[in-house]
Image (tube, grey):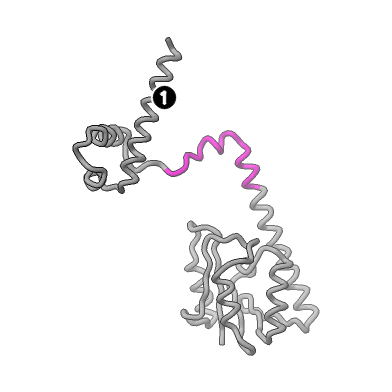
C-alpha cells in the first residue's frame, strides 16, 4: 500500500500540486495526508503523524518532493530510519530509498542537505529584504474592507444607540466585531486629527 504526505508552510501556498503529483505516483486520495501552516523544521505535525501511523510493514511512504518531508537533515533521516526499522519503504517522487545501498544513502543525505540550505537562504534573503526601509514601507498588511466614510457612519449610528450592532453589521455586510473595529478606526482617526491640529497651534 502507498501512503502519501504533502505539506505547505503557509495558507497562501497550494497543496493541490503536491496532491496531484502523489496521485500520479499511484497514491489513492484517501491515503494522502496533509499539513498546512507548519514549517519544515517542525516535526510535530498532525498530518505527518497520521501518515506515519498509517503505514505498515511492506507499505511505501511517498512524498512528491523531499523538502516537503522536512528541511532539517537530522529530522528527515530519523524518519527514514524509523520507516526502515518498521519495514516501510521511503519514496521521494519516483525514487525509492534503499538504506542498504551506500550510494542511495549518500544521495539522499546530499538532497536533504540542499533542501535545508535552500530553506536557510530563503530565510536570509527575507530578513535582508525586510531590513530595507523601502520594503517595509510597501508592506501595508491587510486593509479594511470598509471605507473611512463607512467607518464614520457606523461610529455615528453605534453612538446614537438607535440601531443594534447586529443591525448595523447586516446593513454594511460585515460582522458585529467588524462594526466595533470600524468605530475604533474612526475614533483613532479623530484622535490623530485632533493631535495634528493641536501640534500646529
Residue 2 vertical position relative to residue 169 in the rendered view, above or below: below
Span colored in magenta: 125-142
Q: Residue furthest left?
A: 162
- For label 1, the residue is 192
Q: Residue 198 falls in which quadrant of the image?
A: top left
Which residue: 31% across, 35% down? 151
From what the image shows, is residue 74 above or below residue 58? above
* Image location (x, y in percent) of residue 112: 71, 67
Q: Quadrant of the N terminus?
A: bottom right
Q: Observer-nearest residue: 101 or 153?
A: 153
Measuring from the top left, give residue 185's x and y in whole percent. Answer: 37, 34
In this image, 177 relative to 40: left or right? left
Residue 56 % position (x, y): 61, 86
Measured along the vertical axis of the image, is residue 92 above or below residue 189?
Answer: below
Return the residue nearer the eye: 85 or 117. Answer: 85
In magenta segment, residue 147: no
Say left or right for 152 vs 192.
left
Amino acid at each position: 500500500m502507498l501512503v502519501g504526505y504533502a505539506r505547505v508552510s503557509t495558507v497562501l501556498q497550494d497543496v493541490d500540486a503536491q496532491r496531484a503529483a502523489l496521485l500520479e505516483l499511484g497514491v489513492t486520495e484517501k491515503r494522502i495526508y496533509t499539513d498546512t501552516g507548519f514549517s519544515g523544521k517542525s516535526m510535530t505535525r498532525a498530518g505527518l503523524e497520521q501518515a506515519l501511523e498509517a503505514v505498515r510493514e511492506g507499505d511505501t511512504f511517498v512524498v512528491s518532493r523531499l523538502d516537503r518531508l522536512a528541511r532539517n537533515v537530522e529530522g528527515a533521516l530519523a524518519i527514514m530510519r524509523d520507516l526502515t526499522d518498521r519495514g516501510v519503504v521511503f519514496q521521494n517522487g519516483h525514487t525509492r530509498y534503499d538504506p542498504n545501498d551506500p550510494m542511495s544513502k549518500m544521495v539522499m543525505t546530499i538532497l536533504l542537505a540542499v533542501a535545508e540550505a535552500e530553506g536557510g537562504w530563503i530565510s536570509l534573503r527575507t530578513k535582508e529584504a525586510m531590513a530595507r526601509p523601502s520594503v517595509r514601507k510597501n508592506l501595508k498588511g491587510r486593509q479594511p474592507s470598509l471605507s473611512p466614510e463607512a467607518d464614520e457612519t457606523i461610529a455615528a449610528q453605534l453612538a446614537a444607540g438607535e440601531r443594534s450592532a447586529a443591525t448595523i453589521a447586516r446593513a454594511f455586510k460585515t460582522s458585529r466585531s467588524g462594526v466595533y473595529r470600524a468605530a475604533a478606526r474612526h475614533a483613532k482617526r479623530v484622535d490623530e486629527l485632533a493631535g495634528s491640529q493641536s501640534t500646529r497651534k
